[in-house]
Amino acid sequence: MADRNKEMNADNVTTAKAWYARWWVWALAVLLAIGIGSALSGTGTADDGADTAVDYQVDEEGNRAEKKEDAVPAATPEPTAEPSAEETESVQAAEPTVEATTPAPAPAAPAPTPEPALSVSQDSAIRSAESYLSFTNFSRSGLISQLEYEGYSNADAQFAVDSLNVDWLEQAAGSAESYLSFTAFSRSGLIGQLEYEGFSTEQATHGVDTVSVDWYEQAALSAQSYLDFMGFSRQGLIDQLVYEGFSLDQATHGVNQVGL
């Protein structure tokens, strides 16, 4: 009996080991393990993708909310159409054409106008005017009058005088010196004499003020000249000198010099 029980237990053990050792049991276990691993792997990937794709922000109450951003579509560049041959020709025709221009030549300088030929009388009047100015002084009008006195026409005389380069201020100064070389004058008397000779007031004043003159000495010379051909009282001679243009002080000095 005991041996029988041992045999039955051995059969049961053999049967139990044979159930686990069957191949389909292990295949089924492998398939279940693969399915469970795939399910777990897919869940993790989906969660990770969701966490990556969705951005969250925390509101004022501390709740986690999904942050939505407006998607800005990327600008798609429009294709550039190349101009046709007709459009290219139209643009080229519209553009102004710059032509190289040759600068105009500078105008030639006008030829100098030839001076008119002098007549015989004009040439002679010019030479006569130059001759007079070479030994004495004249005003413009005085020289014209001198040429007319010589027989030249007024036109030839004026032409001759105006053809010369004459400094009339210098002529007035020379004439003033010439008068003072042979007679005595007061300043105003000498200016009056130059104006009588044809100089302007400006020319005569310039001529008199240019020369170096001692008017007190001129008053003494003038007083002596008067006494040489007639008698005068002291006061009469002083009055005559004042009339000639000397100042009272100059006239008194001149009379005192001659002994009156």
Image (tube, rainbow, N blue to C red):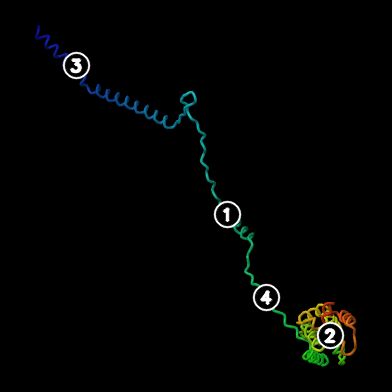
Mark 1 to mark 4 CA distance (whole Å): 47 Å
**Disc 1 versus disc 4: nearer the observer:** 4
Q: Nearer the viewer, residue 230 or 84?
A: 230
Q: In the rendered structure, are the residues bearing label 1 and label 4 in contact, judged by CB atoms less than 8 Å apart?
A: no
The mark nearer the N terminus, 1 or 4, is 1
**Amino acid type assigned to the residue bearing label 1 in the image:** Pro
Q: Residue at x 64, y 70 (%)?
A: 101
Mark 4 to mark 3 CA distance (whole Å): 132 Å
The mark nearer the N terminus, 3 or 2, is 3
Q: Residue at x 55, y 53 (%)?
A: 82
The residue singled out by tag 2 in the image is 259
Q: Give coordinates of residue 151: x percent, y percent.
A: 87, 92
Q: Residue at x 57, y 54 (%)?
A: 83
**Amino acid type assigned to the residue bearing label 2 in the image:** Gly
- Residue 106 is tagged as 4
The mark nearer the N terminus, 4 or 3, is 3
Q: Circle 2 — which element?
A: loop
- Residue 83 is tagged as 1
**Amino acid type assigned to the residue bearing label 3 in the image:** Ala
Drawn side of residue 254 relative to residue 84, left or right:
right
Mark 2 to mark 4 CA distance (whole Å): 83 Å
Mark 2 to mark 1 CA distance (whole Å): 123 Å
Q: Quadrant of residue 232?
A: bottom right
Dot 4 crowding, Cα within 10 Å, few <14, some 14–19, many 20+:
few
- Residue 16 is tagged as 3
**Disc 3 versus disc 1: nearer the observer:** 1
The mark nearer the N terminus, 2 or 1, is 1
Mark 3 to mark 1 CA distance (whole Å): 91 Å
Mark 3 to mark 2 CA distance (whole Å): 192 Å
Q: Give coordinates of residue 161: x percent, y percent.
A: 81, 86
Q: Give coordinates of residue 180: x percent, y percent.
A: 80, 86
